[in-house]
Image (spheres, rainbow, N blue to C red):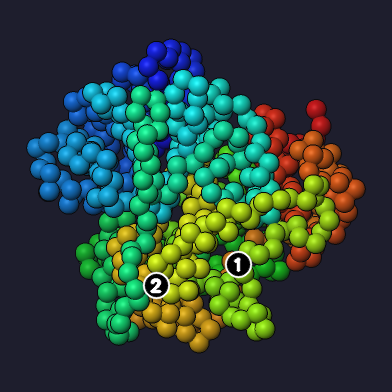
Amino acid sequence: MCGIGGIVYRPGATPRDNATLKRFARALAHRGPNGIKIERLGRTDLIHTRLSIIDLEGGDQPIHAGPAAMIANGEIYNDPDIRADIGNDYYTTGSDCESALRLWQRDHIGFSLRLRGMYAIAISDSAKDTLVLTRDPFGIKPLYIVELFDGIAFASEPAALVAAGLVPPEINPISRSQLLELQFVTGSSTIFSGISRVLPGETLHIKSGHIDNRSRQSPLPPGPVEVISEAAALARLDAALMDSVRVHERADVPFGLFLSGGIDSSTVLAAMSRLRREAGQGSPLLTWTATFDTDNVANESEQAARLAKATGAVHQVVHVTRKDFWSHLPAIVGCVDDPVADYAIVPTWLLARRARESATVVLSGEGGDELFAGYGRYRRALRPWWRGGRTMRRHGIFDGLDILRPDPAHWRDDLTNTERSITGAPTRLAALQAADIAEWLPNDLLLKLDRCLMDHGLEGRTPLLDPVIAEAVWRLPDSLRIRNGKGKYLLRRWLERELPVSDPFAPKKGFTVPVGEWIAQEGPRLGPLVASQTSIAAIADPDRVRSLFRNAATRKTGPAAWTLLFYALWHRVHLEGADRNGDVFETLMPG
């Protein structure tokens, strides 16, 4: 896993100086601690920071093929198949990413249609005066662009574009409203004015420094609902799961699993354990889980420990305390330059810090709820209004609290447009899932995973988000998604067979981080500090902010207080240049 960046210049433009490019590269160095390369090819500057995973000695980038050169952040899981098709004699490295370059040579703009993996890729072809950018269909790996007066710059993180001085750090007010009400930013815009996301599955063709074509690949297969028996669906799911986990384990470095104890990570654990048994492999799995210093929130750490013991895994428990929260939150917020105020960033960052002591790659269960219909919000949205049915994310975090000024407008527009754009889903339930796969998944869950792990130079892999699995399950009837009021029915059936100790049909406690409790304990002290921030005064009444923090213990006020605290810290670090290494109170102190 790596960091990529670069600038493609228009004819006649003066390239940026070495100092700018070095600042650009340094801002991406945490994504690739094993080496930095800066290279100018014609009118394009390419920057690559490498985290060595496969072909440790020979996989440096850019990788060249005549006038074309490629840099990539990702893993191509069907690299062996592509090599067999193209012919290994054409390759110059053992890097799995080289297959993208060889496909470009052969297939040109359609090269990404053959790729199976997670990736953000840039290919510069000086003979064609072309730069191509592409991102994997689920949006597992990030990619951003900014259109300049003299060309286009791109990077794995928007903070690198800001650090290089290519764009000023100015706030997009609509994206800020999305962050406050949803806790993540939707669509192609980012919270930084002028910086845009390359959308999941999007390929940009850039000619002479101008975007002249955009195309997009869906992660979900088309087609109507299938007529299939449960036994046949289980057999197909089994083949897909085992194939996906097998290729996601491919690495030349130590790897393990984030094990929450829930259905999704337990499924990955069961598949990894079975692969070891079938291979007669003696080395045990490495697993990590988080637990908290309070009994007032649900967590499944005891279940995770039982599952680890049943599969012979070497299991580590990371105890997340209120001291960790207050001490490390500025550093955690500092790694999410594209902000996501999901409280799970706290345990994810701390788990990554621990895991990096013994591994370089970690698998996780992201995507299970979206592909297998696990969220209760799907079931609620399917009910008629008179039975409690309601639109997903109809209300924002601050609805009814009378705190923000002006009242955020248009925060739901991108979500509404996404929901309306979904056509051809096999069922109404699948359409709800598709909306989450388009917005919530890449812009919250996967962004959180990418930034928290890459902050420690750790690669995260998500085997449930694989086109092979999407092909196996996306067109299944709703009866194999939800049954007896429980989502993920087919996945639970598979897990019940493969790992009975997981008891997948038992009521689950879920996973909650006690940020509301921690904030409430410090509310009288914290409220005045948050209210005094210029970033907060611009959007909220200070007296009402102080009152919110004094009364932050309720189900409604807790998330609102957390979101304002997150935004205040985020603004201090990313817009005002505060040191991310202090504690919360030091970071918020004036001066």
Instruction: Say if residue 247 shows up in the picture.
Output: yes
Q: State the mark number for residue 193.
A: none
Q: Quadrant of the N terminus?
A: top left
- The residue at which mark 1 appears reads as 392
Quarter of the figure with residue 279: bottom left
Q: Residues within 10 Å of mark 2 (few under 14, many from 20)?
A: some
Q: Residue at x 43, y 58 (%)?
A: 364
Foreground residue among 207 and 319: 207
User: Which amino acid type is shown beneath numbered disc 1?
Assistant: Met
Foreground residue among 503 and 470: 470
Q: Is residue 136 above or below residue 388?
A: above
Q: Is 161 left or right of 251, judged from the image as shown? A: right
Q: Residues within 10 Å of mark 1 (few under 14, many from 20)?
A: some
Q: Nearer the viewer, mark 2 or mark 1?
A: 2
SS for callout 1:
loop
Q: Position of residue 390 (x, y in %)?
A: 64, 73
Instruction: Say if residue 473 shows up in the picture.
Output: no
Q: Residue at x 32, y 46 (%)?
A: 75
Q: Quadrant of the C terminus?
A: top right
Quarter of the figure with residue 511: bottom right
Q: Position of residue 243 (x, y in %)?
A: 26, 63
Q: CA distance from mark 2 to mark 1?
A: 19 Å
Foreground residue among 166 and 337: 166
- The residue at which mark 2 appears reads as 426
Q: Residue at x 12, y 48 (%)?
A: 85
Q: Residue at x 37, y 17 (%)?
A: 11
